[in-house]
Image (spheres, rainbow, N blue to C red):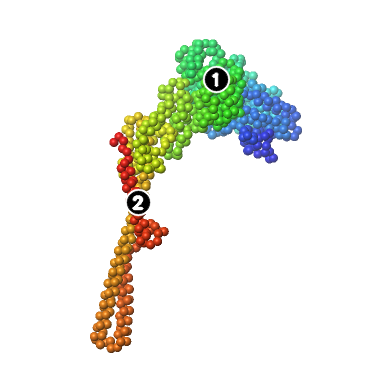
Amino acid sequence: MDAGVGVVGGYRLIRELGRGGFGSVHLGETADGTRAAVKLLHTGPGVDPRFAEMFAREVEAARRISPFCVAQVLDADPRAERPWIASEYIEGRTLMAEIEAEGPRRGADLQRLAISTATALTAIHRAGVAHRDLKPENIMMASDGPRVIDFGIARAFEETGVFTATSRVGTLHYMAPERLDDARHLTTAVDVFAWGAVMVYAASGRHAFSGRTQTAVIKRILVEEPDCSAVPGELRGLVVRCLEKDPERRPTAHQVLETLLGHSGGGAGESVGVDDSMERGSTAVTSVVAPESTGLEPTLLETRRVTVEPEEAEGTRRTGPEGVEEPEPEGKGPEWEDAGPDWGESVGSRPDPYRVPEPLGRSTSPPFRFAGRLHRTLEELAATMHAHGSAAEEVFGDSDRRALLAAWVVEDLADPRVERSLFRTRPVDPALAVAGFVGQVRPDLPPRYRGRDMRLPALREMAARREAGPADPGVVLPEVLEVMAEYDCRDAAHPCVPGGGCTEYRDLVEDARSARSAYTGAIAPYAHWQAAAGLGQLSGPVERVADAEFVLAALAPQAWERDVAEERDSLEESWRSGLPPLPPRDAPLSERLAHGMVLRRMCRLLRELSAQYARLVTDADLLEGYVQERAEIRSRKAQERGARIALGAVLGVCGLAVLAGLALWGLLASAETVFLAGVIVAAFGFVAYRAIGDIVGHGTGVPVGTRDPFPSVAGHRAKLARTQAAIADVDGRIAALDRIRAQVPRPGR
């Protein structure tokens, strides 16, 4: 970021986006969060005093440019110490970055790029501005289509001599010969030449005039022919004419656009007004633009809007979707319905069953501003809201802004297509209101909700990929899918009526709701059993099932049924016998979903009961083990005491016998001798008693290995009494679970 520059014209500069010959571009943000691309121009002391005035005129003219396909100028200060200009900030890569990353453009992508950039040039030139620096780096590939940027300042730089004598405005490979020849007066033809060079680069990834040195490039631009070999044949002739050396022989941007739309062919006359051409161009960019006959790749139908020729309006009309009459083209038979358009035919002029005609002539209604752009038709606004969902939600969520939108739709446009209830009260879900609004006005657009792709293949993939994480249940509510059903059906094999939405969404919602209704009856006996058994605090049949679960199951029934079977098989056989039977494979989907949902709820409950049962059995085993161990210890201690008493008696008798024998033999002549002999015999007997008693006790002792179930209770007798009471309680609870398991309802068996 430029040193010392932090805030410019109310825009806080966040970071530098890039630098070029004119200046440095920064991402700016206002206090209310609005973002813009702010360009600080390279000017210094001694700048021509005419620069500010000319720059101001260029900016003022740039502000008049229709915002389609260009970055709209938001603000500027040509007379600031360092002049600056703020324009719409566009997310995305430049065309050059796209080509470098993904390769050249082909088919419909190339055609859409050609039409959008030609429309942008037409709008720029109509405002009296010449871009003078059109190149791939100045074309942003935004989410809503290509956008031309960085216009409105080149002329002020070039014609006031801000650069040095050796510097030029523009990029060499895209500079017209008259610029290299220092022509005195430059025209908008320089932009047409640059457009042709851009198309060559987009189609091939190579420059139309390449060379290793600047001198070689300049020579080829001035005297040699461009390399257009990679440009498709249907576009090549137009590109070659745009790259003519003589600016007088090049078509205007308007004529280029008309040629792309299949009107005048780029001739000298301008048969269609500029406004009409730009409107047709904006429509064609989002139309079916890939005819098979020209080898262009087919694309999805992206618009219902079709331009109505004035001469067609006077012809016979036919009824289209929603009862709107459509003009029948003159001189065209039924075979014209199947004829594919080509580059010489107006894109979008081929009738299709989805189209609704545009109003004839230019709209006299005031525009509606949204997302920094002015919208003159409801179709344009719906397309922008589709691309800027969060901003659209703010409109519908705010009472004042919603009222302004309602006034524009109802009073200014008097358009009957939009349901008025969308405007009358604050919607509970603004995102759903946006989806409904877009679906009613532009049902040709791909359905989206909260930024998520709501096409059925994407939803089915999301539902089937449960292992990747839980899906957002909010996007698969029945009321959401009912709104998605208003969008056009894109499945050629599906028997949907053109203009009537997609019945597959409605069938899906019907299956989900039928399954819920059947589930209510199927789960009733199990819920009653659960409540009667006092298991209401557990999940299971009494647990409410969200509507989204039925929709997710209906989206991917096979994957869902596999999950149900796996849950059922994961239960122990003793508990699995209490489950309801699986429905037959040929049963209706709603019935299979309902009974499968019962199985899942019962599996959840029985799994919890099974876990409780296992814990109780484990507790009972531990308590009984403790009681048995204490009984064994008491028995063995009693045996040890008996053995010691018997041993003591034997040793006492032996000692008395020894003393008696000594007395008979006359060895104990005095009392002292008798006393001494008695002491010796008693000491020997005590030692023998201890030694032999330890041996006996060691053989009869019991090691304590069972965990003490009640460590806080003192005394073995008290512990034993508490343990026996706990065993009785656990046995009672196990018996209760056995009774509950035996009482599980078995409907249909």
Q: Viewer-proximal residue, 384 or 44?
A: 384
Query: In the rendered image, which residue does mark 2 sit on?
Result: 730
Of labels 2 and 1, the one closer to you: 2
- The answer to which of 363 and 22 lies nearer the viewer is 363
Question: In the displayed structure, does residue 389 sit left or right of residue 563?
Answer: right
The percent coordinates of residue 527 (x first, y second) are 37, 38
Q: For the residue marked with disc 2, what is the amino acid?
A: Val
Image location of residue 554, percent across then percent down: 40, 32
Asked whether, in this view, residue 501 is left or right of residue 70, the answer is left
Q: Up-down: is 648 above or below 517? A: below
Picture residue at 71% right of the left edge, 26% below the top: 54
Q: Is residue 441 visible?
A: no
Q: Residue at x 61, y 28 (%)?
A: 372
Visible residue check, residue 496: yes
Which quadrant of the structure image shows residue 373? top right
Of labels 2 and 1, earlier in sequence is 1
Rendered-image quadrant of the C terminus: top left
Identified by mark 1, the residue type is Asp
Secondary structure, mark 2, is: helix
